[in-house]
Amino acid sequence: MSLIVQKYGGTSVGDLVRIREVAKRVAKTYDAGNDVVVVLSAMSGVTDHLIQMAEVLTDSPNRRELDVLMATGEQTTVALLAIALTEMGYKAQSILGHQIPLLTDSAHSSARIVNIPKDQVKELLDQKKIVVVAGFQGVDPGGNITTLGRGGSDTSAVAIAAAIQADVCEIYTDVDGVYTADPNVVPKAKKLSTITHDVMLEMSGLGAKVLQIRSVEFAKKYGVPVHVRSSFNEEEGTMVVNEDKDMERMVVAGVTLAKSDARITVTKVPDRPGIAAQVFQAVADAGISVDMIIQNTRSGNMTDITFTVGGADYKRTLEVVKKVAAEIGAEDVAGDTDIAKVSITGVGMKSHSGVAARMFRALADEGVNIMMISTSEIRVSCVVELKYAELATRILHTEFGLDRED
Amino acid sequence: MSLIVQKYGGTSVGDLVRIREVAKRVAKTYDAGNDVVVVLSAMSGVTDHLIQMAEVLTDSPNRRELDVLMATGEQTTVALLAIALTEMGYKAQSILGHQIPLLTDSAHSSARIVNIPKDQVKELLDQKKIVVVAGFQGVDPGGNITTLGRGGSDTSAVAIAAAIQADVCEIYTDVDGVYTADPNVVPKAKKLSTITHDVMLEMSGLGAKVLQIRSVEFAKKYGVPVHVRSSFNEEEGTMVVNEDKDMERMVVAGVTLAKSDARITVTKVPDRPGIAAQVFQAVADAGISVDMIIQNTRSGNMTDITFTVGGADYKRTLEVVKKVAAEIGAEDVAGDTDIAKVSITGVGMKSHSGVAARMFRALADEGVNIMMISTSEIRVSCVVELKYAELATRILHTEFGLDRED
C-alpha cells in the first residue's frame, strides 16, 4: 500500500467525459489499496477565459481580485471530480487552497509556497477518503486567496506530496513522459524512462514544457519521486528521481530548444570599470531577467555588450537599455528576436570532458554558426540563428546518440 | 453619511456590461459619502449551468460538493466587480463566505445562518474600502462551504445588514418594487411605496417572487429596513419597514397568486382518532411541507382528507400517501395539479371584519368556485381551479380597490 499523489492537468479534466475518465483512474488506484490524493488544474481554456473577462474590464486587473477569480477554475473541477467519485460509490472530498491551508506569500498571481500543514489532508485520508485538492491556489497569512502562476498545479502537487511524504507524485498530462527532445522537432526523439531532478530542472528551464520548473525545484529539494505520464493511456511514463545509475552512462539526456528569447546589443560602450554593471543594474531594476551575456572588446577602449532576455521582456528591455546607453555614451542599441537557444543537458557531462567541444564541432560541420554560448556543470547552451533552430536540435540529437532505432 | 448594503441579483450582474453599470451605481453611492457593502448573486443562468454540469455526472450530486461547485458563481461576480471598481479608482475588496465568516449550519444547499461576526467587514469599511460580498454562500463549523438555497443572496444581504447594523439594505432586482399584484397577471397593479415586514412575509410565502422569504424573516427579526428597487433605473422602489401608518389605512395591500401547488385527496379514510395524524406524520417524515388541509366527514364513520403541497413534492407525496393509505385501509388516493392559490394580504385586515366574506362573495359573483380556504391574522387564501387563477386575481384586485387609476 502506497500513498500516491496524482495530478491531472487541464486537458485531462477538459470536459465532463474526461473528468469521469479521471475518476475511473483514481478509483482504480484506490482499489489497488493505495491512499490517493488528487490534485487538479482548471478545465483547459477556463483560466484564460477568466482572465479575458477581467481584461474586458481593464488592462491591468487588480491582482488580488484576479486570484479570487482564477481560483474558481480549480474549485469547479475538484467539486465535479468529487461528485463523480461519490456517484461511483467512493468516499471523496474536495479541499481548497485555504482549507488545507496551502500557505503562500502575498505575491498575487505568482505566490510562493511557504508552508503546507499536513493535518487536514491526513485526517481525510485516515477516514479512507479520496482527497481532491484544488491545484494552483493557496492562501496568504491575511486569508487572501493567492495563485501560484502558470503551471502552478504541478507545484501544488509536488509540494503536497512532500508535505504528506507521499511515495510518489504522478503528473498526468497530455504527453506520455519526458522525451530526449520535442518529438515535434525531432521525430526520432525517445521517451526517457528515468531522469534526475537536476537534469529535469535544467530542461524545464530550457524550454521543455512538461513540468513547471518550480515543481521540479520542490521535487529536488524534498526528494519527491515524480512520475510524468499520460492520462490517455496506461503506459509507464518518465520517473524523475534524485539519482539514477542508468542516467550516468548517458552523457547527454536530452536536447532542448527555446525559440522565444530576444537578443540585445549595445555597441561602442566606453570600456570603463562599472559600465557593464550600470547597464545590467538598470535591467534588473526593471524586474527583467537576463540569460546570456557576451562582451566583445573593440579597439580604442570600446566594447560591445550583447545579452539575451525572454521575448516577452524584449520591448521593455530595449526602452530601459536605450535610456542607460544614452547616459553612458554608448553608440547604439539594437536587438532582434530571430534567435534560438539549443541546449544539451545530462548528468554524465560532469564526468565526460569534451562534450561542449563535440557540440560546437557538430554544429559547425553542418554550417550552423554559434552566436553565444553558456554552460553549467550539466548543460551547454548555444544561441543560433532562428532559421537553424530545428536543424541544430536534430544535429545534436543524432550526435549524442539519442535517436530512436526503429 | 449612511451605512448602506446593496444587493444585486443575477440579471443585474448578468454580463460584463451590467457589472460595469453596477460598479457605477455603487461608486455613486460611495461618492455621496456613504459606506457601502455590496452583496452579489451569480450571473443569471450560471448557478443553473453549474447544477446541470453536476447532473450530467449523476442524478443526485453529493451536496457538500455541489455547494463547493455553486459557490464559484458568486466568487466570479465579486472578483469582477472589485476589479471594475478598482479600475475606476476606488478601493474595493471582495470577501467570500468563509472569509467573513458567514457561519451556517451544515445543511448543504439550504443552510441556515448561525452567526455573522461583523469585524472583518467593519475593518474593511474602516479602511474606506467598498466591500464586495459573495452572496448565497457561507461556511459551516467544520470549514465546509455551504449555500443558502435559491434566492439566498437576499438573505445574505439582509443578514449582513443586520450584523453590521446598516441603515438600509437595498435589494436591486429586475423589477422596480413590490406590486399590489403581479403586473403580468393584473395590468392595473400598482407599485407599493411601503409595505410592512409582516405583509411582505406573507406575500413572499404566497408567490410574490420579489424577495426570498427567509430574507424577510431576517429583516423583520432584526428590524432591517429593506428597499426593493430596480437596478435598471433610478426610481424609488418599495420600502419594507417594521410599521407603516399609511399601510394601516389600506385593508388589503396585495393579491398574490401561486400556481405551482398540488392537491391530494385520500378518500374513505376510517374516521378513528389519530388516523389523520398517521397520514401527516408519514408526509412530514418524508420532509414534505403541507400547506392547507380539509377534512370532510362522510356518513358511516368515513372521512375524506384533502391537502395541498408544493408541486415539486407532488409525485413523492402521492407515493408516501398511497403507502400509508393502504396501511390504514383508506379507499383511494387521488391528486391533481390543476389548482391555484389566490391570496389577499394586509395589516389592515386585523382591524377590519368581514374581509374574508367580501373575498368569497366577490369570487362567487363571478362564478369562481372556492375549493379550499385558509386564513391568518393578515391573510386569506383560497384554492380555486387553475383555469380561474388570473381571473380570480383580477377580481380581488378590483374588489379591494387596488387598481391603478390612469
Image: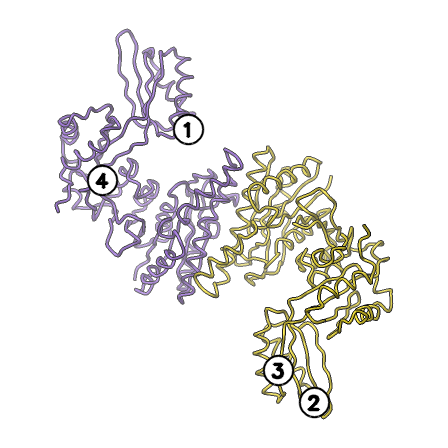
Chain colours: A yellow, B purple
User: Which is closer to the viewer, label 1 or label 3?
Assistant: 3
Are the residues under badges 1 and 4 in a single subunit? yes
User: How far apart, in angstroms, are the residues tagged by discs 4 and 3?
Assistant: 75 Å
Where is mark 2, residue-wise?
A302
**SS label for mark 4:** loop
What residue sits 24% from the left and 28% below the top?
A: B387
**Mark 2 vs 1: CB contact within 8 A:** no
User: How far apart, in angstroms, are the residues tagged by discs 2 and 3?
Assistant: 14 Å
Subunit that carries the residue with mark 3? A
The 10 Å Cα crowd at callout 3, few under 14, some 14 to 19, many 20 or more, is many
Residue type at mark 4? Ala
User: How far apart, in angstroms, are the residues tagged by discs 1 and 3?
Assistant: 77 Å
User: How far apart, in angstroms, are the residues tagged by discs 1 and 4?
Assistant: 31 Å
What residue sits 25% from the left and 26% below the top?
A: B385
In-image side of B12 versus B100 (left or right): left
**SS label for mark 1:** loop
User: Which is closer to the viewer, label 2 or label 4?
Assistant: 2
Where is mark 4, residue-wise?
B181
In-image side of A289 versus B162 (left or right): right
